[in-house]
Image (cartoon, rainbow, N blue to C red):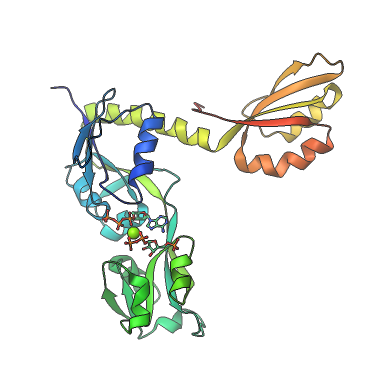
């Protein structure tokens, strides 16, 4: 039987859809029967194990899965020996301390001697120890934001994204402990054969991720402004320039980071650029 790399993906929850999407964008198609706990890729030596996010670091450490897509916050919390290979840019959130919105907050001393509810006791304990704080940790597995309202705790340590769950529960965020996103993790001792499959997968993932952050840009500009515009464009190497039928005008093509695009747009226009288009890129190999 030929070797297959085993990847763990969340069985159900926030990470599953985007995890399967990134594999698909890498050209990997999974036969996905509903409620299946194990599946195979049709066109890549990959076997998918659907597991609980919170169990994944241990499975990867123990080699049950070779690699996994998991929340970085869970990797930190579980303190297992796994290697983070690549941040994947989705499921972005932060682990933060929050307190009742009307409480006065004068700094970390606020937490001294307080009772704090969390589903992330190891991360909270590390934060308290680092800051020489003596607080009582109360572990609950979900709906942490309700704890202060029902008299279970004074404050909480939980994941925040938009902040709307905190707001709805009359809490305010006061300290960020950790920022997190989905990441690809790996067992520390995988075989050479599996490493070769992993290298191929990583190459594809990085091409997909680079493409997401960049746009293909086309614009028209007076030919005598090409040099000025090329100096403004933070492109890959050098822009492609083609003459337009209209005399004295050229078309310029390049690739720009999404963020840079918005910062240079006014300068491009000031140099006579017109008809500026951006096109999404499928894959980008640098
Ligand atoms: N509000 C949020 N916005 C963005 N990402 C989030 C948010 N809440 C959690 N996450 C990220 O998504 C991951 C999965 O969250 P989800 O609630 O689906 O599962 P879980 O309850 O942590 O795990 P399990 O699969 O063990 O039940 C979290 O570990 C975190 O990295
Ligand atoms: O800042 P927000 O955008 O409101 O998101 C934060 C909430 O999202 C997560 O809960 P989730 O919805 O995953 O529910 P769970 O506790 O059942 O996992 C997290 O535990 C917070 O409660
Ligand atoms: Mg959750």
Q: Residue at x 26, y 71 (%)?
A: 140
Seen as rendered, the residue at the extreme front is: 34
Q: Is residue 267 above or below residue 174?
A: above
Of residues 70 and 177, the one drawn nearer to the viewer in this rendering:
70
Residue 37 seen in the figure: yes
Quarter of the picture holding the N terminus: top left
Where does residue 257 sit, x and y in percent of width and height?
A: 60, 37
Answer with left or right where residue 225 lies relative to residue 10. Answer: right
Where does residue 115 sit, x and y in percent of width and height?
A: 33, 82
- State which quadrant residue 196 falls in: top left
- State which quadrant residue 73 falls in: bottom left
Of residues 208 and 82, the one drawn nearer to the viewer in this rendering:
208
Residue 134 seen in the figure: no
Q: How many marks?
A: 0
Report ligand 3 position as a quadrant: bottom left
Where does residue 242 sit, x and y in percent of width and height?
A: 74, 16
Q: Is residue 20 above or below residue 161?
A: above
Q: Residue at x 29, y 77 (%)?
A: 137
Q: Residue at x 41, y 31 (%)?
A: 25
Seen as rendered, the residue at the extreme top is: 245
Q: Residue at x 67, y 34 (%)?
A: 234
Q: Is residue 196 above or below residue 260?
A: above
- State which quadrant residue 141 falls in: bottom left
């Amino acid at each position: 039987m030929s070797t297959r790399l085993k990847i763990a993906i969340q069985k159900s929850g926030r990470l599953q859809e985007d995890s399967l999407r990134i594999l698909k964008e890498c050209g990997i198609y999974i036969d996905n029967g509903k409620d299946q706990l194990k599946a195979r890729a049709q066109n890549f030596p990959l076997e998918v194990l659907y597991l609980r996010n919170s169990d994944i670091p241990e499975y990867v450490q123990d080699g049950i899965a070779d690699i996994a897509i998991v929340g970085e916050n869970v990797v930190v919390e579980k303190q297992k020996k796994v290697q983070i290979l690549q941040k994947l840019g989705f499921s972005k959130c932060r682990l933060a301390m929050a307190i009742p919105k009307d409480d006065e907050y004068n700094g970390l001393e606020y937490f001294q001697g307080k009772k704090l509810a969390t589903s992330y006791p190891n991360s909270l304990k590390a934060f308290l120890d680092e800051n020489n704080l003596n607080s009582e940790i109360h572990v609950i597995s979900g709906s942490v934001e309700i704890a202060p309202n029902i008299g279970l705790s004074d404050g909480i340590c939980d994941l925040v994204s938009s902040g709307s769950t905190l707001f709805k529960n009359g809490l305010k965020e006061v300290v960020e402990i950790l920022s997190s996103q989905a990441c690809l993790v790996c067992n520390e001792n995988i075989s050479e054969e599996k490493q070769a499959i992993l290298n191929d997968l990583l190459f594809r993932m990085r091409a997909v991720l680079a493409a997401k952050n960049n746009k293909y840009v086309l614009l028209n500009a007076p030919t005598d402004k090409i040099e000025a515009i090329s100096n403004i464009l933070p492109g890959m190497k050098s822009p492609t320039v083609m003459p337009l039928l209209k005399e004295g005008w050229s078309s310029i093509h390049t690739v720009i980071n999404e963020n840079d695009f918005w910062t240079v747009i006014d300068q491009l226009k000031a140099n006579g650029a017109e008809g500026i288009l951006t096109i999404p890129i499928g894959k980008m190999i640098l």
